Amino acid sequence: MKRYVIFSCLLSVVYIISANAQQASTLLQLKDYSFEVYYSSGFGQRAKTISMRVEKAMKYNQQLLGFTPNFKLLVLATTDWEVNAAKGAVFGMPHYKDKNTLVVAAHDNAFWKSFVPAPGQLPDDISEQIKTVYKTSDTTVSMQAFFDLLAIHELGHAFHQQAGLKMQRNWMSELFVNILLHTYVAENEPESLPALTLFPRMVVAGGSTGFTYTSLQDIQEHYNEVAQKYPRNYGWYQCRWHVAAGRIYDSGGTQVSRKLWDALKMQNEILNDQELIIFLAEKADKSVASMVVDWDNNNTGSQIK
């Protein structure tokens, strides 16, 4: 019996190695980047475009934060997504398959298109902006330009996670990487700011009616539940953080990310809510503390004096 169990385990290991080899062999490797890049056949140019942006953001964040994370990038078509992406991940949503593997979509898809509002749902001026900002090469409208930028959002998570920062709250992790994202785009790709900011502003302007969770305390206590079971509710939170990140950058400038990074890096004890507000105002930037104080007023922008 003992020999049979050992033999079975060996067969399982061989099978897993073989399966992984088969999975990897379907992807092509892109060279000459500071991280490994693998992509689906037929999407080499798309992989280069995404990799160049991630490389540029990587170097910018390295210089800004003084830290270098380790990761690899997968640029996947639908044919490779189910095998190589995280189990259950919706095609089109940038994410980590594991702590070191960043996965993004290689082409436009139904998920991105699903966020385009129906005609008549929004004021005419907003509708016209959407048609302009999110128009694709084939003249259709898709949120691809916004979701492509989320690769930089996910890259930000590699920085704070691998550096071992105590982020204090679940929502702080998301706010921090959105500040990094907004800072990178504002400083390096200002032409992409409309694509980054229009969609979140549209979602926030739609209000929170019908959502189960809306407070920062809610998302802290139910983070996994909201992310997994209430994707639209979670998307609303993310859009609130995107809008807040823009305001924080406008207030604190380029160095606000570094100030927040340094503050979180030095604070190993978990603070209570009031302590956290004071800590953010004194050690990071008052605009970050203002977001927390003002959250339930729909982030209207009041400032801590």
Image (cartoon, rainbow, N blue to C red):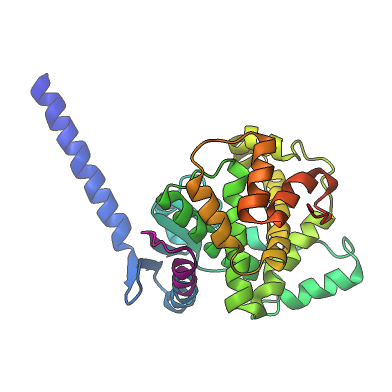
* Magenta span contains residue 58: yes
Residue at 65% of width from left, 76% of height from top?
Answer: 192
Relative to 195, residue 163 above or below: above
Taking the image as shown, residue 237 lies to the left or right of residue 129, namely left
Residue 4 picture location, percent across and down: 12, 25
Residue 236 picture location, percent across and down: 73, 50
Number of numbered discs present? 0
Q: Quadrant of residue 80?
A: bottom left
Residue 221 picture location, percent across and down: 64, 32
Q: Is residue 239 visible?
A: no
Q: Is residue 202 visible?
A: yes
Residue found at the far left of this picture: 3
Taking the image as shown, residue 300 lies to the left or right of residue 189, namely right
Taking the image as shown, residue 213 lies to the left or right of residue 229, namely right
* Magenta span contains residue 21: no
> Is 116 or 203 nearer to us in this picture?
203
Q: Quadrant of residue 135?
A: bottom right
Q: Which residues are magenta?
A: 56-72
> Is 239 or 294 nearer to us in this picture?
294
> Is 91 or 51 nearer to us in this picture?
51
Relative to 120, residue 225 above or below: above
Relative to 144, residue 98 above or below: above
Relative to 149, residue 282 above or below: above
Q: Could you tell me which quadrant the N terminus lies in? A: top left
Residue 155 picture location, percent across and down: 49, 60
